[in-house]
Image: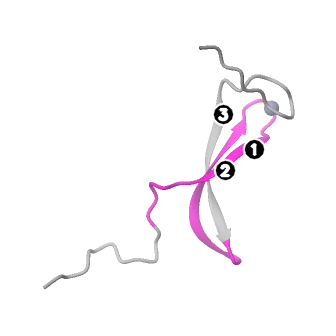
Amino acid sequence: MAIQGECPKCGKRVLHVNVETIVGIVDGSSKARCISHSCIHCNTVLSVEIDHRAKPRTRSSKPPATA
Ligand SMILES: [Zn+2]
């Protein structure tokens, strides 16, 4: 399958993307780990998504005691 996606800025086909971990800001404070995908040719950000693998830091790392 040929890759058809093009960068909207430089017009080159997006065969590779830079993947960077960035921080999502909610109401002025950092709340979520996010991932940005950017063009390797011109660094235009193509998309940003929440990193669902990252756990929020507000909760304790230990599970609550059930007993
Ligand atoms: Zn580009």
Disc number placed over residue 17 in the picture, else none: 3
Q: Is residue 50 magenta?
A: yes
Query: Of the residues under marks 1 and 3, which one precedes in the sequence?
Result: 3
Segment tinted magenta in the rendering: 26-55
- Taking the spot 75% from the left edge, 22% from the top edge, the residue there is 13
Which quadrant is the N terminus positioned in? top right
Q: In which quarter of the image is residue 38?
A: top right
- Taking the spot 77% from the left edge, 27% from the top edge, the residue there is 6
Amino acid type of the residue that numbered disc 1 sits on in the rendered structure: Val
- Mark 2 or 3, closer to the camera: 2
Whether residue 45 is situated above or below residue 66 in the rendered picture: above
**Residue corresponding to mark 1:** 45
Disc number placed over residue 61 in the picture, else none: none
Quarter, ligand 1 = top right
Which quadrant is the C terminus positioned in? bottom left
- The secondary element bearing badge 2 is classed as strand
